[in-house]
Image (cartoon, rainbow, N blue to C red):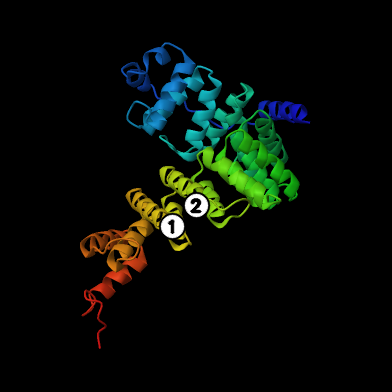
Amino acid sequence: MLGVAFTAFTACASSSPAPAGLPSAPARSTDVLSHDPLGAECVAGDGASCTEAGRRYAAGDGVDKRTGRSALFYARACEHGNPAGCGAYGLALRWGRGTRKNLNAAQKAFEKGCRLDDMTACWGLGAMYVRGTATTQNAQLGVDLIERACLSREGGACFGLAVLYEKGGVVAANTGRSLYFARQGCQHGYGKACAAAARVARSGVEQRSFWVLGCQSGHGDSCVDAGRAALEGRGGDRDVNEALALFHAACELGAAEGCADGAVAVGSAVVSPEDRVRAMALLGTACKKGSAAGCGQLGAHYWRGDWLPRDRNKAATLLYSACRGGHQPSCRMMDAAQQPGAATGERRR
């Protein structure tokens, strides 16, 4: 089925009008790349080194993060016929990362990469067909291309299929197939696929397991969900230590608001004084990671002196920061704190 579909894709792509234009790297890019410390082998024609340089600039791996420079390297990689470079350049063009957004050019890059067996490119091309953003609309061909990528261990493609079968529309809704593809994506290390599998899992035990796997694969929201399950004893034993570790992982992975909510949930549960101290430390981490709610909750505890020693100066600083970050309960608490008698706990008569 997939072999036939891909043959059809190749024939269709060669016989239908090609989307104009896969932009080459600008002429000036040769000078730019030849003077780049990562560019010598790329300019000499080594497509794999171009792709690796693009990846490093996209991620800020040992160099300053520069998406524009990354896109130049990916463009040159695709010119040199590097499959992964075409897939990465297609994504840059598709979403406007470091270069101007250009759907026609993205399709060309994906087509070239997919013919060279880059599964990210096949996934991207399939998604364009499914969403109707390709030059011709062919949802079934899109689904077949995405499935090809999934069966070649491209976890994100499996996640895409799981969502399609969960929601229905392009394909008939099918919870069993949704779970199958989500499980495949999760096994291939794509954290969002683990979260999708948890949504349609058949038991609490399976659901919690998928969240933990998602957290281990770097999906912060899965860490939050797994932490709540551990705290509440859903899908297994109640384990406060595990919950705190999972909420901390959420903070480190950028899910700071969920991390803050988790810390409050631990503090509010029936836990030991030591666990409550750890929960407050976690709130501090969430605040440092940018959670306005985390700063506000921490400030409120300092203001009231519950769970933490009373410190009105710290409280005021934290509440002010949280209010500026859009946390309205902190703004209201600051207003209330300015009322006569607030500092002493007396009510205004």
Can residue 329 be seen in the rendering of this structure?
yes
Q: Which residue sits at x=36%, y=63%?
A: 327
**Does residue 326 appear left or right of residue 182 in this picture?**
left
Between residue 236 and residue 207, name the one nearer to us.
236
Between residue 43 and residue 118, name the one nearer to us.
118
| Residue 11 % position (x, y) | 71, 26
Q: Amino acid at mark 2?
A: Val
Sequence-earlier tag: 2 or 1: 2
**Residue labelled with disc 1:** 272
**Within 10 angstroms of label 1, few (less than 14), some, or many (20 or more) residues?**
few
**Does residue 268 appear left or right of residue 154 in this picture?**
left
Q: Which mark is residue 240?
A: 2
In the depicted structure, whether residue 196 falls above or below residue 294:
above
Total tally of numbered discs in the picture: 2
Q: Which mark is residue 314?
A: none
Q: Which residue sits at x=61%, y=33%?
A: 188
| Residue 9 % position (x, y) | 70, 30
